[in-house]
């Protein structure tokens, strides 16, 4: 079994950590709020005070944090992973959803330190992380992926290898941009249905069995109809971040993303309304306010 350092114990990171313990790996964890590690420590994980302290003897470092800023601090900060001098050949597995530019920069920094980098954003809800059924969207050298695969299989049911480093992140940003557009569309549709006097619960169930249905649309339309935004599956702030990263990539590739920009505008309005930390389904409140005097 491998010696693994896992950095970042949000809902996704905690689920991944639990699966690594279930698989018998020797696990060290680090988190900005160490109290989150208590259930894992009770099961045999060790708690390090910083990312640097977690990594010196690790065979692999797995990171799951929220954005570029957090990732940069974890990897390159004064107490970050590279400051801990992990050994040559250590697998550097970054599972966070990050900007494409930062992933390439981070990969270069990791390679310069002698690490083997795996671009490995995930798709799936926190329940999937806890169940070990995530889908991994991988960009990596085939040989590096072969070395990492036994570890990755502990917390995933499916692995899609899109190519070299950056390819996994490219796909993740593309699919999250599609999701943002879908959510913006269903918010507008339900706002229209409400103004038309339709029952939103009935509309949401009709959508679920129709041609517009997708897991993203079904989940969010039901929550919009029920005004159920407090239990956070994916926050508006994170959706805004992913959408902004995706549009930045589209611009660099010379591809217009006008639908994505409309979705981003709605998410910016959501954040301005103070709703960024509730579930992304709250974007219906933005749609409701449009056109009102």
Image: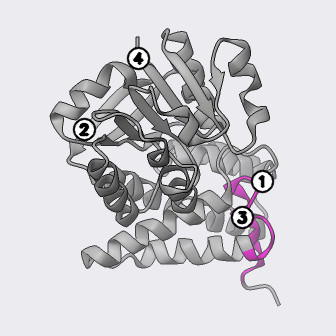
Asked which secondary structure carries label 3, the reply is: helix
Residue at 63% across / 41% down in the picture? 50
Q: Quadrant of the N terminus?
A: top left
Graded by Cα atoms within 10 Å as few (under 14), some (14 to 19) or many (20 or more), the crowding at tag 2 reads some
* As drawn, 192 above or below 207: below
Is residue 285 one of those drawn in magenta?
Answer: yes
Q: Which of pointers 1 and 3 indicates the residue nearer the eye?
A: 3
Where does the image place residue 285, in percent across and percent down from the top left? 77, 68
Question: In the drawing, does residue 172 fall left or right of residue 195?
Answer: left
Q: Which residue is disc 4 drawn over?
A: 2
Task: Give the Cα distance between marks 4 and 3.
Answer: 45 Å
The residue at 64%/32% (across/down) is 48
The tag on residue 61 is none
Residue 249 lies, in percent from the top left, at 35, 70
Q: Is residue 127 visible?
A: no
Of callouts 4 and 1, which one flags the residue occurring earlier in the amino acid sequence?
4
- Indicate which disc, 1 or 2, sits on the residue closer to the N terminus: 2
Q: Residues within 10 Å of mark 3 (few under 14, many from 20)?
A: many
User: Spatial distance from mark 2 to mark 4, Cα to Cα?
Assistant: 22 Å
Task: State the quadrant of the C terminus.
Answer: bottom right
Which residues fall within the magenta stretch? 272-290
Disc number lying in front (1 or 2): 2
* Residue 241 painted magenta: no
* Cα separation between marks 1 and 2: 43 Å
Give how far apart the Cα atoms at labels 2 and 3 are. Answer: 35 Å
The one nearer the camera, 179 or 268, is 268
* Residue 49 visible in the picture: yes
């Amino acid at each position: 079994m491998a010696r693994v350092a896992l950095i970042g114990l949000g809902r996704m990171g905690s689920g991944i950590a639990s699966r690594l313990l279930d698989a018998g790996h020797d696990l060290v964890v680090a988190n900005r709020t160490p109290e989150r590690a208590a259930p894992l420590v009770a099961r045999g994980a060790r708690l390090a005070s910083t990312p640097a302290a977690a990594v010196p003897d690790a065979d692999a470092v797995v990171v799951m944090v929220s954005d570029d800023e957090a990732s940069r601090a974890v990897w390159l900060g004064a107490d970050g992973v590279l400051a801990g001098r992990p050994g040559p050949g250590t697998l550097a597995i970054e599972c966070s959803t990050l900007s494409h530019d930062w992933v390439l920069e981070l990969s270069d920094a990791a390679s310069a330190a002698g690490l083997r980098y795996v671009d490995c954003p995930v798709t799936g809800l926190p329940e999937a992380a806890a169940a070990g059924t995530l889908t991994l969207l991988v960009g990596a050298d085939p040989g590096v992926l072969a070395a990492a695969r036994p570890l990755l299989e502990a917390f995933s049911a499916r692995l899609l290898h899109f190519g070299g480093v950056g390819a996994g992140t490219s796909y993740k940003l593309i699919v999250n941009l599609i999701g943002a557009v879908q959510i913006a569309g269903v918010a507008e549709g339900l706002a229209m249905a409400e103004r038309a006097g339709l029952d939103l619960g009935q509309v949401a169930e009709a959508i679920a069995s129709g041609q517009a249905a997708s897991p993203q649309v079904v989940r969010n339309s039901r929550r919009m109809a029920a005004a159920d935004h407090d239990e956070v599956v994916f926050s508006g702030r994170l959706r805004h971040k992913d959408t902004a990263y995706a549009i930045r990539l589209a611009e660099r590739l010379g591809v217009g993303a006008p639908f994505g920009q409309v979705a981003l505008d709605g998410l910016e309005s959501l954040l301005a309304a103070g709703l960024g930390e509730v579930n992304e389904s709250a974007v219906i409140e933005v749609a409701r306010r449009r056109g009102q005097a």
